[in-house]
Image (cartoon, helix red, strand yellow):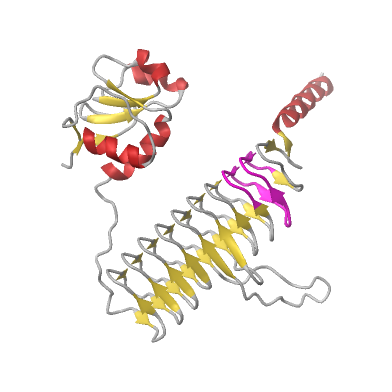
Amino acid sequence: MKTIKYSDIVVRLNQNLIEVKSDIKDDEEFSGINSLLNAQKEDISFFSNIKYVDNLKICKAKACLINSNYIKYLPDNCKSIIVKDPYLAFACLTELFNILTIKSNGIISEYVNLNKKCKIHENVQIDSFTNIGPNTEIFNDVIIGSNVNIGPDVVINNNSIIHNNVTISNCIIEEGCEIKPGARIGSAGFGFEEKSKKKIIHIGNVIISKGSTIGSNTTIDRAVFDSTKIGAFSQIDNLVQIAHNVEIGNHAIIAAQVGIAGSTKIGNNIKIGGQSGLAGHLNIGNNVTIAGKSGVTKNIEDNKVVAGFPAKDINEWKRDIIKIGKLNDIRSK
């Protein structure tokens, strides 16, 4: 069983700029990280939502990531690891405790087709029945699964993971990215002249910035001229459609079944709920939250929270819902 010393936990959190305060000794060891209810006596848990306070009170874990405001609820058996944002700290520690962390084995299967114009760097793993096309460069420690088609004109940087059945063309993937099974990246977008339906030839590409994850069966279309861009450390869920020339800032969180139409520009720290749709050629500011199933038809300023169709300020939307509810009550009487 793999155990982690408390000193290693502190190092990992400090690497992510998380300040830690605890009386736990550096050589204290932990066997895993788990939820409040499932944690055992050698585990670490985390508390980030007050509605789970009853679970905290009976937690069996040896220690808990917790904000200082809530340590009074900890049981005697559970020591505090005080951090400002316990959920963020939890996220940073999951990889540390994950003994199944994927690493390249450096083996290129004999059943891989490598084009003469591709370049493969050191310690790259490529599994069976994968095709690497022309003008493709794959850097160190990359893992590429089975039945993958990559190229032409693709660059995949260090420590990225491409899972099975992915198709990538006309794309630059920066270091530390993960592309989940079935994703389609870099194909031509949905562009044509409306009257004649004449297709527009796309000659741009896709750029996925470092540390980002693209979900299963998500599609990201190449730009007409320049680049469709996904910002650094973004998390794109499964079954998302991102059209040509879209630009998304850093630290985006986009849930499943979202559709973003062409040439829409989105700022940093965006959160988009599932099944939302964004019209084309919009400007969405920084720190914007779009509630699930919203339909965005207009620009949104920084720091706004919107909901509904057409999407509006969430407080206005809530008032409208209350009014509709009251009208329905009157009509039903």
**Residue occupying the point 75% across, 29% down:** 316
Q: What percent of the width, then of the height, locates residue 224?
A: 66, 71
| Picture layout, residue 10 above or below residue 299 | above
Main structural element of the magenta stretch: helix, strand or loop? Answer: loop
User: So how many labels did they put on this image?
Assistant: 0
Q: What percent of the width, then of the height, locates residue 204?
A: 61, 72
Residue 314 located left or right of residue 250: right
Quadrant showing the N terminus: top left
Residue 193 located left or right of residue 114: right
Residue 75 located left or right of residue 198: left
Q: What percent of the width, then of the height, locates residue 65?
A: 34, 28
Quadrant showing the C terminus: top right
User: Which segment is the magenta one?
Assistant: 266-294
Is 144 covered by the magenta stretch? no
**Residue occupying the point 25% across, 71% down:** 107
Pick out the residue farthest to the bottom: 116
Residue 199: image quadrant is bottom right
Is 286 covered by the magenta stretch? yes
**Residue occupying the point 28% across, 75% down:** 109
Residue 205 located left or right of residue 36: right
**Residue occupying the point 50% across, 50% down:** 234
| Picture layout, residue 132 above or below residue 184 | below
Q: Nearer the viewer, residue 301 or 90?
A: 301
Q: Nearer the viewer, residue 3 or 112?
A: 3
